[in-house]
Structure formats: structure tokens, C-alpha cells
Amino acid sequence: MNKKAFIFDLDGVIVDTAKYHFLAWQKIASQLGIEFTPEHNEHLKGVSRVRSLDIILELGKIKATQEDKNKWLIQKNEDYLSYLVDMDQSEILPGVFHILEFIKEKNQLIALGSASKNARPILEKTGILPLFDAIVDGNDVSNAKPDPEVFLRAARLLNTSNENSIVFEDSVAGIQAANTANMVSVGIGDKKILHEAKYNFSDFTFMDVSFIEALCLPNPSKGGAL
Ligand code: B16
Ligand code: MG
């Protein structure tokens, strides 16, 4: 039987770093006199660092020089990294480890498909790096989600077809990327926001291993298994 590729987004899916990205961006925004709310932040999820800054500047109708942009990008990342200094296993979101272990037990493949350039140190700090058969992050791709490049690369590295790939995502852009790639999209978070996903879960504690088991069967995306 062909193995399935289970591709996990990082921020907001495996670890709750989305809140740290928000705090770091909020600091930049308030420095610039821009109101930046959790609702605005939804548009930044899964989006690259450079594009995120552009979105915030557009929000405040601010035109900036490249020099200023570079300065803010460095400041944002330094601030974000300061939240990660003491990161350990306890930052893994509830239920995730159990699901990762179950996929391994079933002898299936696991990849990371993240827009973050800080992905590897986060996986190392949380101790789950060895569970991953492939890692694709913000350092490996030139097109950000909703472009499917990150997930296509992950499937290719695992020698798996797109139809045999399942993507877990907390961002609208990521769900759109998975759908464009013809992969099975699983939204983790608010169903109202992630309504384009094929399946939805508030978080991994709501996901029974029978869901993963069914996805391991041939072609669940064609309607057979679930
Ligand atoms: P960094 P994901 C994304 O990670 C975040 O959702 C997004 O908010 C962030 O701007 C982006 O990574 C870049 O992150 O600044 O660490 O390179 O959700 O795709 O795992
Ligand atoms: Mg995410």
C-alpha cells in the first residue's frame, strides 16, 4: 500500500507561536501608530514575514523606504525570538504529539510545511524534530501560501502524490494552498474562518485516531474512507 504524507503547518498547528507573532507585530504597529487587532492578525497567519509587514503598512497607509522596512523586519524577528528562548515540549499544542506518534506507529510519512524561517530551531527545542521525514520551511520556498509550493515540495521530498497528501493548517492561505495542490485539507481552528477546508477540528484534542486511520486507507480524498 502506498504511504500517505501527513504535512503539518507549524505556527498555530504544532505550537502556539501564532500568539508570539501577533505580539511582536503589534509592537511594530503601535510604534507606527497603526491599530492592529486579532482580526487583522488572521490575514498574517501563514504569510511570510516580508508580506506580513507590507500588510501592516498597507493597513496604516504608510509608505516606507526599504531601509526602514529592513529595520522593522529585524526588530520584529528579534522580538519574536525573545519569546522562544525558554521554549520546550510544553509549548506543543494539546493532542498534537499523540497524533504524530500514531502516524509513526501506522508507518506513514510526516513532513513540515511552514512559511517560517524559524521552523527548525522550534522543532529542536520542542524535541519533535526526529519525528519528521521531511522539512520544508520559509528558507526553502520562493512563493508564499496561498501558493502551494511549500506543500508540493514536501510531497515531492516524500515521493508521495498530491492526492495521497494530507495537510493540517490553521490559516486560510494554507488551506487554499492545500486545496490548489489537490491535497486533503484539514483546518485546525475556527471552522467559520477555515470553511474552505475539507475537514475541520477546533484543535487536535477533538481528533480521534480513527480519523487518521481512515486517511491512511487508499484515496480517502475520493470519498471512500470517511
Ligand atoms: P518567520 P506557519 C508562518 O508560519 C506564520 O503563520 C506567520 O505568521 C509568519 O509570518 C510566517 O510563518 C513567517 O515566520 O517570521 O518565523 O519566518 O504558520 O506557516 O508555520
Ligand atoms: Mg500556521
Image (cartoon, grey):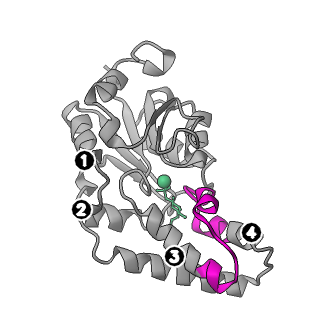
Residue 97: give its label.
1
Looking at this rendering, what residue extends furthest in the left direction?
105
Q: Residue at x 60, y 48 (%)?
A: 173
Identify the residue position indicated by label 2 in the image: 90
Q: Quadrant of the C terminus?
A: top left
Q: Earlier in the sequence, mark 2 or mark 1?
A: 2
Type of amino acid under label 1: Phe
How far apart are the two marked residues, 1 and 3, measured between alpha carbons? 27 Å
Type of amino acid under label 2: Ser
Q: Is residue 30 left or right of residue 18?
A: right
Type of amino acid under label 3: Ala
How far apart are the two marked residues, 2 and 4, measured between alpha carbons? 35 Å
Identify the residue position indicated by label 3 in the image: 24
Residue 59: give its label.
4
How far apart are the two marked residues, 3 and 2, measured between alpha carbons? 21 Å
10 Å neighbourhood of mark 4: few (<14), some, or many (≥20)?
Answer: some
How far apart are the two marked residues, 1 and 4, measured between alpha carbons? 37 Å
